[in-house]
Image (cartoon, rainbow, N blue to C red):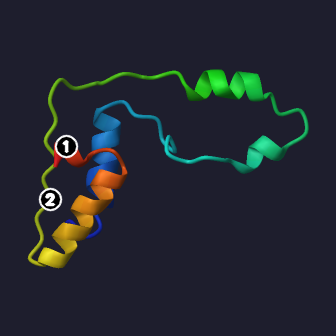
Amino acid sequence: MCGAGTLLAEAGAYALGLAPGRLRECWAFERLPGFDNSAWETIRHQAAGARVESLRLLGIDSSPKEVAAARANLAQAGLGSYA
């Protein structure tokens, strides 16, 4: 039931203290009047740091196609080395 690897990616990002939406390039609120780009860049680049010293993401599925999709999605999320 690893499917596309969404639950594995979310769990891995949480365990490593990675910010939600860290791969997203733009947000709608950036177009609001009064938006402070300098403050946003400061917040955006603050790293929470790892919460765990070691991490292993394990997903199991009877479909090799789904396992491959999960691995590809974890790699795209920057978590491929933990799978």
Local secondary structure at mark 2: loop
Residue 18 place in picture, x, y as percent: 40, 34
Residue matched to label 1: 81
The tag earlier along the polypeptide, 2 or 1, is 2
Quadrant for residue 72, please give it: bottom left
Look at 66% across and 26% down and name the residue there: 41
Q: Please name the amino acid that badge 1 sits on.
A: Ser
Residue 7 place in picture, x, y as percent: 30, 56
Q: Which mark is residue 37?
A: none
Vertical order, 72 against 55 (above or below): below
Q: How would you rate the neighbour count of disc 2 (Cα within 10 Å): few for under 14, some for 14-19, many for 20 or more? A: some
Vertical order, 10 against 41 (above or below): below
Q: Is residue 1 visible?
A: no
Look at 74% across and 23% down and name the residue there: 38
Residue 66 in the figure: left or right of residue 13: left
Q: How would you rate the neighbour count of disc 1 (Cα within 10 Å): few for under 14, some for 14-19, many for 20 or more? A: few
- What is the spatial separation of the Cα atoms under label 2 and label 1, in whole angstroms? 14 Å
Residue 70 place in picture, x, y as percent: 25, 63
Badge count:
2
Residue 45 in the figure: left or right of residue 53: right
Quadrant for residue 59, please give it: bottom left
Vertical order, 28 against 14 (above or below): below
Quick one: 45 or 5, which is closer to the camera?
45
Look at 29% across and 52% down and name the residue there: 75
Residue 46 in the figure: left or right of residue 39: left
Residue matched to label 2: 59
Q: Nearer the viewer, mark 2 or mark 1?
A: 1
Q: Residue furthest right?
A: 33
Look at 29% across and 45% down and name the residue there: 11
Residue 14 place in picture, x, y as percent: 34, 38
